[in-house]
Amino acid sequence: MKHVFSALSVIGVAFFAITLSTTNTGCKKAKDGAKGDTGTANVMYSPWLDVDFSPATNNAGDTVIWFGTITAPKITASILDSGVVKAYVNLGTATNKLIFPLPITDLYALTDITELQVYYTPGKIEMYSDVDAGTFTSSGQKAWQYRYVIIPSGVPTGRSAINWNDYNAVKEYFNITD
């Protein structure tokens, strides 16, 4: 089982690194015209979403992995080729947030999770975990909700100034509201 998740981790990191390396575009100074707005108007983000995870079993009937999918029609091939998509999970509640960027590994100190991988495809965000990482309600509050942020290629991001793994920094830079 660990080998499956290790392979998924390596594939996920490689895919993410390739995606990021292909999103850098050169900057050209405009010859005339006034400076425009900061460019955050085209940034898209989802509300905090409930996601169900389903088990996948082996021939013996043992659960070997859990998977969940977010339908995200605004994630297009063009966005994947030249934009940025980032997903986050709020392990806490709306009033007591505990937000992590995806993918995450080895959160065993906080939860039973050791891996939660994410893969982006046109129209979907697919996630795989070693535990049921689906949204649940406890004491009337939802926990384990998911959100994604889409930055199209034409939006200046100041990538070097943003820590993409710091949800609060991304939220502040792009004026994302909870």
Image (spheres, rainbow, N blue to C red):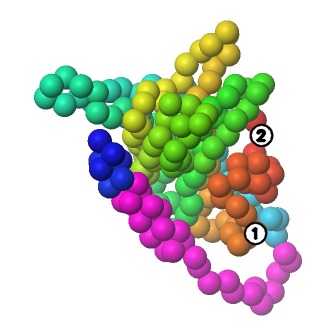
Per the image, label 2 sits on a secondary structure element best described as loop
Q: Give, as a single range, the part of the protein colored magenta.
A: 9-35
Q: Is residue 3 above or below residue 78?
A: above
Residue 43 placement (x, y as % from top left):
67, 54
Sequence-earlier tag: 1 or 2? 1
Residue 100 placement (x, y as % from top left):
63, 43
Q: Is residue 18 above or below residue 152?
A: below
> Which one is closest to the eye, mark 1 or mark 2?
1
* Residue positioned most to the left: 59
- In-image side of 151 versus 134 (left or right): right
Q: Is residue 71 visible?
A: no
- Location of mark 2 (residue): 177
Q: Is residue 141 above or below residue 97?
A: above
Q: Is residue 9 above or below residue 72?
A: below
10 inside magenta stretch = yes
Q: Residue at x 49, y 35 (%)?
A: 113
In the drawing, what numbered circle is on residue 161?
1
- In-image side of 143 versus 117 (left or right): right
